[in-house]
Amino acid sequence: MTLSYQNHYHWQNHGKNLSSVADRYYEPTSAAEIQHIVQTARQQGRKVRVVGDSHSWSPLAVTSDILICTKRFNKILDISTDPPRITVEPGVTVGDTLRAFMQHGVCLPMNVDLPTLTIGGAVSVGANGFSKRWGTYSEFVEEVELVDGTGEIRQIHRERDGDVWRAVACSLGLFGIFTKITLALQPTFNVRVVNRKIEMRQALDDAATVFAQHDYAQYFWFPFNREVTLQTSDVTDAPATWTKGKQRRKDLNGWFETVATHVVKPLLLGFPRITPLFARFASDSMKAGVEVMDQSENMLLGEWINDMVPSLNASVSFSPGDDCAPLRTAWFDAVDLVEANAKAGKYPANLAMNTRLFGKNTALLHCIAGDANDVTCNIQITSFNNPHWDTFKNDLMARWLALPGSRPHWAKQYQDLPDIAGRLRAVYGDNLSTFLRLRQQHHFDPDNIFVNPFLAGLFFNEPYV
Ligand SMILES: Cc1cc2nc3c(=O)[nH]c(=O)nc-3n(C[C@H](O)[C@H](O)[C@H](O)COP(=O)(O)OP(=O)(O)OC[C@H]3O[C@@H](n4cnc5c(N)ncnc54)[C@H](O)[C@@H]3O)c2cc1C
């Protein structure tokens, strides 16, 4: 088999905080082609990493050797209603699946924020939605087919493979390259989506009650605003009020905001003191209102985001406890740090902070040992890049990671934190040991060809340079 590839390919992630020159870059379209790439790489003693939409901010996929991108390996192979299931190639996007779900009357009962992420990428990092009832993408995996580090095809099934499934379902590409993914779905339903503005302190005081009362809930805050936006969604029998026209208007606004970011970012860098004004304007763009829509339409962002000025992101997940006290601590850690910076004339965070709950997590690298059934709280903050972001993000992450059981979102920025490998070992404990043991015991990657320097530093005690 002869496959075409590009030499010295300049790769950059969407957030533009990562880049590399990959010696060889492939866009395969079949499992057989991936097998060939991996087998040849193994014979030549090379390393291989894979990307989907390259929307992660951590260097999970950075390589100077062989880079595979799945964007042309992107067919929906099967979708059924009884039982509700979808089987896809890994480069299928979240948006492709949502359109298919709506045609077939099925849904994934949780949504991430962006339609362009690939299913392979979302499963590999365990991307989360915003419902306490539902876990991450990994949790919906019924079966995956992957090419392991010897170039062999393997099938891993949720019921049949127990702990191996728990390892593979959120494996950051360390167990092999997914070539086929089957997700368990639900018959579709409508949700009533309500956006309202609430005074910040009141909103956070009521968070535990709000999360208990609603099927889906998340809070948004733009720095320097006294109010937050609370978005709740609840399953309903009411007919949809969301129309194609309203969706088009939302998309049009998205494109308008996208263009605006190219004007605003240089202004924020040149005149950082206008950040509070911008943040108030941005907060106003999240309008209060009520709509009923198909679950698959309840998504924050659209494809326009890929043309926006890229943003950076720090995020952790932790146990919210019964009363959401840790959430309030995390939230006001960020607010206090933003305000302390402003007093010093610095404006490191200029986009939204968001918090949400997500449900049960069985994957080894997604739950705190022993607490797989517990609800998890995720908090994240985004900003356009600026000279003060890195210091701010590291200060904030140090506080956020001090919360009991707290750990970074695999795809977000945590790579610069001192002793992050030690922190991960401490928080994942036996789960991480089991993950690494199963990988070795079942010979998923005997020559470590899927291990890049970042992952070597995190999991294999090697310095990350
Ligand atoms: C605007 C925006 C919105 C986001 N919203 C959310 C959100 O709502 N919830 C959330 O949790 N996260 C969110 N994220 C983060 C996102 O979930 C991750 O970045 C996700 O992995 C991105 O998918 P991707 O296709 O870009 O994957 P990539 O970044 O390309 O890859 C991510 C990881 O998956 C691995 N991988 C990719 N394909 C395969 C494969 N076929 N086999 C094995 N491994 C593979 C890669 O090696 C890498 O380790 C968001 C990011 C952005 C930029």
Image: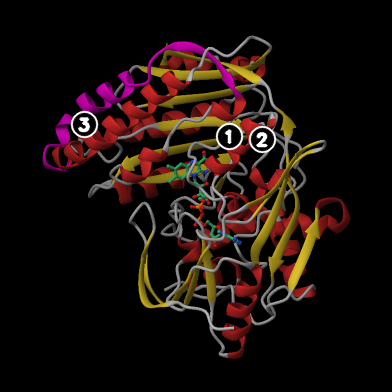
Quick one: 11 or 451, which is closer to the camera? 11
Residue under circle 1?
111
**Displayed quadrant of residue 128:** top right
* Label 2 neighbour load within 10 Å: few <14, some 14-19, many 20+: many
Of callouts 3 and 1, which one flags the residue occurring earlier in the amino acid sequence? 1
Q: Name the residue at 72% across, 62% down.
A: 145
Q: Is residue 131 left or right of residue 227?
A: right
Question: Which kind of residue does numbered mark 1 sit on?
Answer: Asn
Calculate the distance from the C-alpha at mark 2 to the C-alpha at mark 3: 37 Å
Whether disc 3's CB lies below 8 Å from ligand 1 is answered no
The label on residue 173 is none
**Label 2, on which residue?**
108
Q: Quadrant of the C terminus?
A: bottom left
x%, y% of residue 234? 63, 17
- Dividing the picture into quarters, in which one does residue 431 lie? bottom right
Mark 1 CB within 8 Å of ligand 1 = yes
Q: Amino acid at mark 2?
A: Leu
Question: In this rendering, is residue 463 above or below 52?
Answer: below
Q: Which residues are magenta?
A: 269-294
* Residue 65 on image: x %, y %: 46, 79
Instruction: Mark 2 and mark 3 in contact? Answer it, CB < 8 Å.
Output: no
**Residue 80: % across, % down:** 76, 40
Do the residues under discs 2 and 1 have CB atoms within 8 angstroms?
A: yes
Q: Which residue was labeled with disc 3?
A: 275
